[in-house]
Image (cartoon, rainbow, N blue to C red):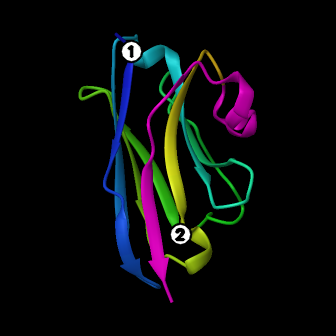
């Protein structure tokens, strides 16, 4: 059974930090690009960051570049998103998703992901 399980969300003040985790199982982790995407109320889902587990390349949305860092522990089948200097506009449900044989630059092609997690809420208060 394929599973992507996110954790680490919560409530934090502006300027604070959170680290999200995405634990994957049921598929060959090394063959997949893992993306972090988010959806705020009344907004479309958007790509935040991604990492290719085959070559380690990463990609970031301009809105988070320099503040967020994505990393992968292939031995644990887990991808992390370290979020620093959080802003109220980062408030959203954060999802991790997996797409086979895709480059990190394909992060924003929402409809092409093969698997999705259930999401974790991140709320940044001002």
Picture layout, residue 36 above or below residue 117 = below
Give residue 9's position: percent from left, percent from top: 36, 59
Q: Work out which residue is located at the far front of the displayed protein and give it.
A: 42
Instruction: Give the quadrant of the N terminus.
Output: top left
Q: Residue 106 magenta-drawn?
A: yes
Residue drawn at 25 percent across, 26 percent down: 75
Q: Nearer the viewer, residue 84 or 24?
A: 24
The residue at which mark 1 appears reads as 2
Q: Single out the mark in the foreground, 1 or 2.
A: 1
Q: Work out which residue is located at the far bottom of the displayed protein and give it.
A: 126
**SS at mark 1?**
loop
Rendering quarter of residue 28: top left
Residue drawn at 46 percent across, 70 percent down: 123
Q: Nearer the viewer, residue 42 or 116?
A: 42
- Left or right: residue 100 versus residue 112 is left
Picture layout, residue 99 above or below residue 40 = above
* CA neighbours of label 2 inside 10 A, class few (<14), some (14 to 19), many (20+): some
The residue at which mark 2 appears reads as 67
Q: Earlier in the sequence, mark 1 or mark 2?
A: 1
**SS at mark 2?**
loop
Give residue 37's position: percent from left, percent from top: 59, 46
The residues tagged by marks 1 and 2 sit, at their Cα atoms, a distance apart of 30 Å
Q: Is residue 85 visible?
A: no
Q: Residue 60 magenta-drawn?
A: no
Give residue 79's position: percent from left, percent from top: 38, 39
* CA neighbours of label 1 inside 10 A, class few (<14), some (14 to 19), many (20+): few
Q: Which residues are magenta?
A: 103-126
Rendering quarter of residue 107: top right
Residue drawn at 34 percent across, 12 percent down: 26
Q: Nearer the viewer, residue 22 or 125?
A: 125
């Amino acid at each position: 059974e394929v599973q992507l399980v996110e954790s680490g969300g919560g409530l934090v003040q502006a300027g604070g930090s959170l680290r999200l985790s995405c634990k994957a199982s049921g598929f060959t982790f090394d063959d997949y690009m893992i993306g972090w995407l988010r959806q705020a109320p009344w907004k479309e889902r958007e790509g935040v960051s991604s990492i290719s587990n085959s070559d380690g390349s990463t990609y970031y949305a301009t809105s988070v570049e320099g503040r967020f860092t994505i990393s992968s522990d292939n031995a644990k089948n887990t991808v992390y998103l370290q979020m620093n200097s959080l802003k109220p506009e980062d408030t959203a449900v954060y999802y991790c998703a997996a797409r086979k044989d895709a480059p990190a630059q394909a992060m924003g092609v929402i409809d092409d992901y093969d698997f999705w997690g259930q999401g974790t809420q991140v709320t940044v208060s001002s």
